[in-house]
Image (spheres, rainbow, N blue to C red):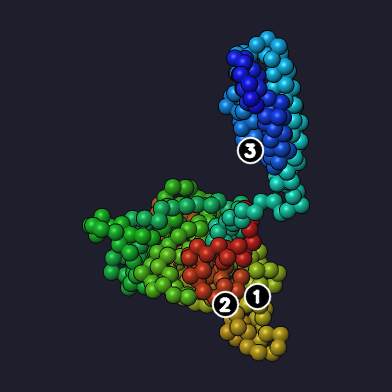
Amino acid sequence: MSGPNNEYDPVQVTPLNAEEVAAARDAALAAVEAAADLEQLKQARLDHAGDRSPLALANREIGALPPQARKEAGQRVGQARGAINQALKARQEVLEAAHEEQMLVVETVDVTLPVDRHPRGARHPLTTGAERIADVFVAMGWEVAEGPVIEAEWLNFDALNLGPDHPARTMQDTFWTSPAENHVVLRTHTSPVQARSMLTRTPPIYVVCPGRVFRTDEYDATHSPMFHQVEGLAIDEGITMAHLKGTLDHFATAMFGEGITTRFRPSYFPFTEPSAEVDLVCFVCRGTAVNEDGDTCRTCRGEGWIEWGGCGVVNPRVLVACGVDPERYTGFAFGMGIDRTLMFRHGVEDLRGFFEGDVRFTTAFGTEI
Ligand code: PHE
């Protein structure tokens, strides 16, 4: 344009001429429309409606214009900014709605999915097994007794008629604690709980004692230096071997089913006299020694019987050592392996499964909690 420039010519303030304002507005509207999410819209707002946007800068120039030009420019810029703000608001609403919609999809909870996807632990089969055994006796009015696994040598051996030089003492290879002069062992059987029960109670005494025992055995499929026994002790007037037999038959039936009874074979234990090994009718072949196909029964290896534990009438010497009058009272005692009992009850072939903590072994017994 030629001719003298007027000091207040609005045309000279380029950002304020109609095309520039329209261009800034259109660019802003296009950016708002193109914003695909709230983040992009935020950027568009900064670029086109922020303090440093072209129209905000243009707005600042308006004050320098002469009145008429100021009015026109003010309207022009004001309308453009209004249009942009409206577009921003409308777009904001659309994008917020879309965002919400999307969150509903993303955060959808499928209520049909299985709940509780953290596998639950199960109680150890030895714990539930010991409890089941104890229950059989508690139902008959017996008490559950416990004793320490680190035991006085005297209670583990001497009180039970296993004197220092008794040959039977070597039958149980013992873990001794040091120093040896303390005469403290890891108990080799649950029988010291018998002694403890007699020392702390007055007859009649009916106790069942499940617990851990220790022997210096190899660790293999059928041996472990730590295993579990359950001991039973009955002290009363007139107790005989017949009571023992009846009790064990009931125990066997309760654990293994109707028709599973026991037999006694003569044996020797220092703490019982007479003593017996107790066998169980094989609960798989039920004493026939053959399986359904006529082959040798694998569970009892063709014996028809399974060795279960030891038992006998409490030796009067033990009664005396434990403060029970042998003239008035007699008693019976029995002891068997809990691990072994569970092994043949559940067909477990390797004892080590009980001790190695593999949850697949444990859960096979059921996830009772
Ligand atoms: N304590 C014996 C053992 O560990 C078992 C037993 C208990 C035998 C009670 C007779 C009476 O082998």
Residue at 61% in and 70% down: 346
- Say if mark 2 contacts mark 1, CB within 8 Å: yes
Q: Which of marks 1 and 3 is nearer the N terminus?
A: 3
User: Residue visible at 40% across and 64% down?
Assistant: 214
Q: How crowded is mark 2: few (under 14 residues within 10 Å), some or many (20 or more)?
A: many
Of the pair 150 and 207, the residue shown nearer to us: 150
3D distance between C-alphas at marks 1 and 3: 74 Å
User: Residue 286 lies in what quarter of the image?
Assistant: bottom right
Q: Which amino acid does label 2 sit on?
A: Ile
Q: Residue 39 carries which label?
A: 3
Q: Position of residue 278 (x, y in %)?
A: 54, 73
Badge 3 vs badge 2, beta-carbon distance below 8 Å: no
According to the picture, the residue beneath numbered tag 1 turns out to be 283
Does the image show residue 162?
yes
Residue 357 drawn at (x, y percent): 50, 62
Q: Name the residue under label 2.
A: 306
Q: What element carries label 1?
A: loop
Is label 2's Cβ within 8 Å of ligand 1?
no
Direction top: furthest residue: 67
What residue sits 51% from the left and 58% below the top?
210
Sequence-wise, the earlier of marks 2 and 1 is: 1
Q: Position of residue 126 (x, y in %)?
A: 54, 61
Earlier residue among tags 3 and 2: 3
Distance from mark 3 CB to nearest ligand 1 atom below 8 Å = no
